DNA sequence: ACCTGAACACCGTTCAAGT
DNA sequence: ACCTGAACACCGTTCAAGT
């Protein structure tokens, strides 16, 4: 990437920074990726990054938001499928960034910035899931519980290496117990 | 603590090191706790820690094993209670070290040492849970699934701040769906 | 507005040297 | 066997200076 200044605008530049950072974070891990390394990959001095982001954590938030909105763009097509397929999709979507999921959880107790982002993310996710469950005739309270359980199962599968069979068994079990027996 | 050398034996010394490290890890977080800080608290030079542990990660493993075996000592009394109470106990037991749970998950992709410990821990936990479930007449396969789900729910609750109601609702829901309806 | 050079305080870790 | 002093390479971050 060129060392251009001023001739490419802020959003384009941030996009490039975040894409490089995302790639390194996902392959080498957040802690193992130094600001110097990211800068080096971009042909830039480490300090440069601090013009765009106040801290490494803030860069991480930028990366998370970008990955998330990229995922959400692919969401519409699967909106009509079964709950099990939807969970399966979410799992696959997060699979590549599983290291980041663990990173976020690991930083919860140290970084208020990450804590905020995490809280917002879960609130948005829950309300989306609850909304679709209610459309299926499930009570608000029950929908809330199921949404949380589904989230924990996805995160558990992401956090721990597992076989395909394990994943399928769990999704199957949840699918059968989630909906109150449609007699 | 005294700077004694040779006059107190290795196990006692390691106990003191790990207790101090555990306290700091749990209150300030693992990354935020430097080796220097731990050493300072012990009235010792940072290098000293490296005579006992090859790395900070190894010290963490020592801390984890100590906390775990301390918890296991309190296990017998609750062996007879209901599954829901047992899960509740596990939750409460891990509550204080919730930061460490997140730390371990966050380091999975970077540290082979932690990965090993984590794998061993989950294997031991699963086999214990499966064993008790089978005693209740549940098939091995079903017991495995339930054990994994229970683990993910506990970890989810630990990783995310939650209200008492949320916790009770989830445990209640699991309790009702876990055991194949005892007619 | 954007980027660099040089520096800061700190980190985990090593090693030769002391007792 | 146990511990220290001094050093190493590196980290995230800051700031004054350049264009």
Image: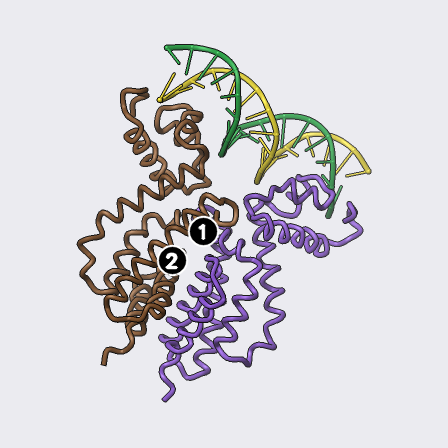
Chain colours: A brown, B purple, C yellow, D green
Placement of B77 over or under B109, stated as above or below:
below
Q: Which chain carries label 1?
A: A
Q: Position of residue B47 (x, y in %)?
A: 66, 39
Can you give x and y, in whole percent of width and height, for residue A97 in the image?
Answer: 34, 48
Front-most of residues B81 and C12: B81
Residue found farthest to the front? A140
The answer to which of marks 2 and 1 sits earlier in the sequence is: 1
In the picture, residue A69 is in which quadrant? Answer: top left
Q: Label 2: how many residues lie within 10 Å, few (<14), some (14-19) or many (20+)?
A: many
Q: Are marks 2 and 1 in contact (CB under 8 Å)?
A: yes
Residue visible at 27% across and 48% down in the picture: A71
Q: Where is residue A170 in the image (x, y as percent from the top left)?
A: 33, 67
Q: Residue furthest bottom?
A: B183
Q: Is residue A79 left or right of residue B11?
A: left
Location of residue A64 in the rendering, given as x and y in whole percent from the top left corner: 36, 43
Depth order, front residue of A61/B113: A61
Q: Look at the picture and state if A137 lies above or below B156.
A: below
Residue where numbered disc 1 is placed: A105
The C terminus of chain B is located in which quarter? Answer: bottom left
Placement of B41 over or under A174, stated as above or below: above
- At a point 29% along the width and 66% down the height, the residue shown is A168
Do circles 2 and 1 both sit on a common chain?
yes
Q: Name the residue under label 2.
A: A155
């Amino acid at each position: 990437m060129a060392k251009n200044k001023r001739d490419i605008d802020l959003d384009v530049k941030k996009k490039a920074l975040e894409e490089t950072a995302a790639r390194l974070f996902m392959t080498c891990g957040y802690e193992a990726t130094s600001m110097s390394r990211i800068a080096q990959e971009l042909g830039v001095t480490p300090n440069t990054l601090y013009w765009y982001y106040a801290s490494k954590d803030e860069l991480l938030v930028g990366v998370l938001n970008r990955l998330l909105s990229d995922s959400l763009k692919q969401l519409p097509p699967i909106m009509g499928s079964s709950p099990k397929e939807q969970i399966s999709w979410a799992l696959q979507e997060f699979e590549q960034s599983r290291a980041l999921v663990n990173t976020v959880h690991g930083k919860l107790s140290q970084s208020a910035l990450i804590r905020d982002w995490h809280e917002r993310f879960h609130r948005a996710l829950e309300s989306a899931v609850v909304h679709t469950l209610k459309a299926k005739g499930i009570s608000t309270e029950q929908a809330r519980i199921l949404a949380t359980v589904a989230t924990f199962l996805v995160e558990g599968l992401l956090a721990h290496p597992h076989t395909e069979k394990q994943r399928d068994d769990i999704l199957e079990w949840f699918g059968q117990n989630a909906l109150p027996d449609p007699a």
